[in-house]
Image (spheres, rainbow, N blue to C red):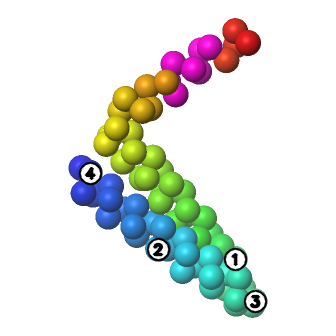
């Protein structure tokens, strides 16, 4: 599962950078498609990176889950 997430992460970030560059440099109707594909790559890369980070070091992410209930106490 981790290898699949790692491959998905690389493909997602690569798509973000490639299509983001195309969206910035192209003109016309291609910009909309490039922006949508870039956003898809961004969300895919970010989601898979965060999933990998939680699987590799779950102790580091334990305080994130606990602080959600404590925010109302402030």
Q: Residue at x 38, y 39 (%)?
A: 54
User: Is residue 53 on the magenta stretch?
Assistant: no
Whether residue 57 is situated above or below residue 32 in the rendered picture: above
- Image x and y of residue 73, in percent: 70, 9
State the residue position of label 3: 28
Write down the quadrant of residue 62 in the picture.
top left
Q: Residues within 10 Å of mark 3 (few under 14, many from 20)?
A: few
User: Is residue 69 on the magenta stretch?
Assistant: yes
Write down the quadrant of residue 30 in the picture.
bottom right
* Upstream in sequence: badge 3 or badge 4: 4
Instruction: Tell me, for residue 2, which label it has, or none.
Output: 4
Q: What's the CA distance linking mark 2 and mark 4?
A: 18 Å
Q: What's the CA distance linking mark 2 and mark 3?
A: 23 Å
Which label sits in the foreground, 1 or 4?
A: 4
Q: What's the CA distance linking mark 1 and mark 3?
A: 8 Å
Marks 1,3: beta carbons within 8 A: no
Quadrant occupied by the C terminus: top right
State the residue position of label 2: 14
* Upstream in sequence: badge 1 or badge 4: 4
Circle 2 SS class: helix
């Amino acid at each position: 599962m981790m290898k699949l997430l790692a491959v998905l992460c690389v493909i997602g970030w690569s798509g973000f950078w490639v299509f983001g560059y195309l969206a910035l440099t192209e003109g016309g109707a291609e910009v909309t498609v490039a922006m949508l594909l870039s956003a898809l790559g961004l969300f895919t890369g970010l989601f898979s990176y965060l999933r990998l980070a939680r699987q590799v070091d779950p102790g580091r992410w334990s305080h994130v889950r606990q602080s959600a209930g404590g925010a109302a106490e402030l």
